[in-house]
Image (cartoon, rainbow, N blue to C red):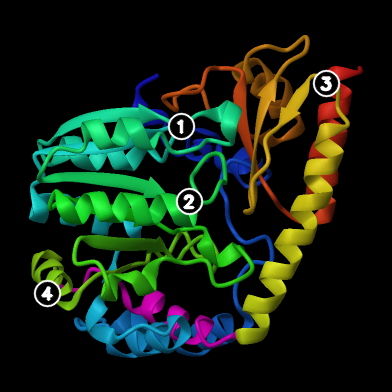
Amino acid sequence: MTLKSSRHGGDVFSLDPAERNKILDFSININPLGLSPLGRKALSRYWEIETLRYPDVEDRDVIESLSLAYGMDKDTMALGNGATELMYTLLRMVQPKKVLVPAPAFSEYRLSAEAAGAETESFLLDKDRGFALPMDELEKKMAPGSLLYLGHPNNPDGCLLAKDDFQKVMALAEERESYVVIDESFIDFVEGNLSYRSFVKTYSHLVVIMSLTKFYAVPGLRIGCSFTCPRLTEKLKERLIPWNVNGPAQLYMTYAAKDREYIKQSRAFCAAERTYFAEKLSEIKGLKVYPGCVNFILLKLTGSIKDAADLQKLLLPKDIFIRQCGNYEGLDDSFFRLAVRTREENDRLLNALKEVYHP
């Protein structure tokens, strides 16, 4: 299986349509509460209008809403057809001499660099030290004109980028005129003001990118956002294709970003359910649970089942998909990842795992 064919978890579209709709998919990390009520109401009322006309090429309403939600100036923001479009466009624009990619990490970091024809070099996050950043190694590898990708929280381990490490990385990047791209696609799941987006006002070489489809539960609509200094934002917008964010996506996010009750409930629910899910998983002999802070959990098989592909085969008759993580650099086939879903769904998976291990 190639990296590209397996890079985003379970491929439900390879299944028969009847099977596809029965699958309980733990391989995708989407808000278990589903759509924002305000966003859903707007979509239900206006979807035909938005479908029958061209979307706003300047994304005005949704940028206004996101600007207020995140406390960021509109001239620091660009929207994309998911965070991935912004990554690919940014790499083509910057044309770095070298791209540094953490391992393990989201596959599109490396793939976007390779698509731009950039030399790509990885560095290992130490899983025995909470997937810590190897600062000494980064200092040696970051040549002038480089670009560094970092996840905050990182996928698949769910660990945050420490403030001290962030400051050290940015000092190094500014000194060597290199860019740092921080992927904050899961930061909205984390309680507290831990985002680094406000630092784009301080660092001219910082880009913060977010997928808005995870927390706001619209992966099928495709929308992402970047934050960087106004000069870079303008250049990025010039390279994005017109109408890259469709009308229903703009409409939904305009209202969902204002849905403060939904945002509050989502964070509280995911934090509580993650704690419950992780505790119950840790009780199953043969599983090692890695600590994290978001709506997914990284695990390692340590018992009689050694390969996550074998575990998937055992779970598929129960209509359950997991995210095998053997294609993440830095991990092997014993690793897999689970999304945090509703209590009923999480219990269904827990019971299935117990049956697999203790038939």
- Mark identifier at residue 125: 1
Secondary structure beneath disc 1?
loop
In-image side of 209 versus 161 (left or right): left
Q: Can residue 347 be seen in this view?
A: yes
Which mark is in front, 2 or 3? 2
Residue extent of the magenta highlight: 242-259
In-image side of 257 versus 304 (left or right): left
Q: Is residue 84 visible?
A: no
Inspect the image, locate mark 4, and give the three-letter code of the amino acid beneath it.
Arg
191 and 350: which is toward the camera: 191
Rendered-image quadrant of the C terminus: top right
Circles 1, 2 touching at the beta carbon (< 8 Å): no
Q: Earlier in the sequence, mark 1 or mark 3?
A: 1
6 and 187: which is toward the camera: 187
- From the image, tell me which residue sits under label 4: 231
Q: Position of residue 145 (x, y in %)?
A: 10, 45
- Mark identifier at residue 161: 2
Inspect the image, locate mark 2, and give the three-letter code of the amino acid beneath it.
Leu
Inspect the image, locate mark 3, and give the three-letter code of the amino acid beneath it.
Val
Q: State how far apart marks 4 and 3 are (Cα).
A: 55 Å
Q: Where is residue 215 in the image (x, y as percent from the top left)?
A: 55, 65
Q: State how far apart marks 1 and 3 are (Cα).
A: 31 Å
- From the image, tell me which residue sits under label 3: 356
Secondary structure beneath disc 4?
helix
Which image quadrant for residue 278? top right
Q: State how far apart marks 2 and 3 are (Cα).
A: 35 Å
